[in-house]
Image: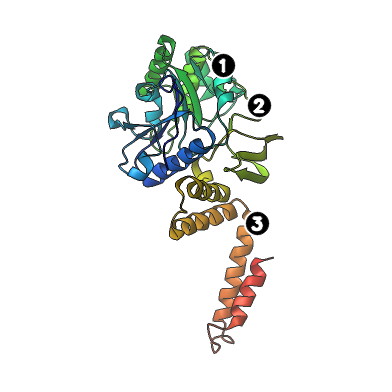
Amino acid sequence: MTMPAIDSDSHRRGVITLAYGPSRFVEQARSLAHSLHLHAPHLSRTLVTDSQDPAVLKLFNKVIAYRPEFGSGVRQKVYLDHYSPYEETLFIDSDCLVLGNLDSFWAAFAGQSFGVPGYRYLTRGEQDPYLDVDHALNTLNVLKLPKFNGGTYYFTRSAQTTDFFNSARNFLDNFSSLRLSEFRRNGPADEAIYSLAMAVHDISLTSMGPGGMWTPCGYKGSLRLDALAGTCSFLKEGRMLSPEVVHFPGEYAYAYVYARERARLRTRVEGKAPAVSTVTGSYIKAALWQSSRNVSALSKIGRAWVKTYRRATSPSRLTRSSSSPVNGAVLESEVRQ
């Protein structure tokens, strides 16, 4: 694969992502780069990483060394302004796939120093797993807190942006007194930190309607995704969404469609499919995760295995061969119930 030609103003505008530590995060960044190469080849893309994998590094126009002194986990996201080489930056989490040219993002955030897609706010009396809402409102003397997913952030290189990030880092340093909850036992979530900074700097969320960036968390029905064609749709919060950037955070990284589309993207961009063992492992994890979303399905599978075990170990069956096709037939018919 050859790197595409980049717009002449590539130093001014680009995409940045972080991928460090466990190899699974670096591989997610690889898939993000594949999707950017396919749908937004004109944009410069930068990877912040500690990886030395040449197959991944060559997918990015710029590679910046990960700086451990900024902290572990999502603390790194509060230093995006120190990493970005662009005048205008769109940060995209490594566990996202891009499905369009991203022009809608630049248009939506035009004129802002910092921006996040979203529409919801937390007000007095509401509960949130990542912060004490009432305490934060009283401490900061504000009326509402932005509530959003941190899959994408937009920011410019400016004095206002520097002030914003400095506020965010100050909140990070004092997160205990602000009653911010631990995220993955590693400090507060970046969304909580940025929410407080946005509140004190009077920065509103930017609604991008059914497009923009969305996660499938809590979706209903089918999740349709074709990363090669650049299409995605699913029902969430009572409306049909069609994100241009789809984010698979946390456990949703095991979703079957994510594993499938990552394999298809790699085949298209790199000209070869991933190793069979890699694909098989991803699909097995995806199948187990999908089953875990349906308690009824898990219950049926569990009951089927128990019944099969009991029948196989009952006195009347002990004299039979363990490889009897009858045992297999019983298991298959009961799992399908």
Q: Quadrant of residue 304?
A: bottom right
CA separation in Å, label 2 and label 3: 34 Å
Name the kind of residue labelled 1 in the image: Ser
Work out whether residue 252 can be spotted: yes
Q: Nearer the viewer, mark 1 or mark 2?
A: 2
Task: Name the image quarter holding the N terminus.
Answer: top left
Q: Is mark 2 on a helix, strand or loop?
A: loop
Q: Quadrant of residue 300?
A: bottom right
CA separation in Å, label 1 and label 3: 41 Å
Name the residue that disc number 3 marks.
296
Name the residue that disc number 2 marks.
209
Mark 1: give few (<14), some (14-19) or many (20+) Cα within 10 Å: many
Q: Which of 275 and 326 is in front in this view?
A: 275
Q: Nearer the viewer, mark 1 or mark 3?
A: 1
Name the kind of residue labelled 3 in the image: Ser
First-in-chain label (1 vs 2): 1
Name the kind of residue labelled 2 in the image: Gly
Q: Which of 46 and 248 is in front in this view?
A: 46
Mark 2: give few (<14), some (14-19) or many (20+) Cα within 10 Å: some
Task: Name the image quarter holding the C terminus.
Answer: bottom right
Q: Please report the residue visible at 56 percent of the width from the left and 86 percent of the height from the top.
A: 315
CA separation in Å, label 1 and label 2: 15 Å
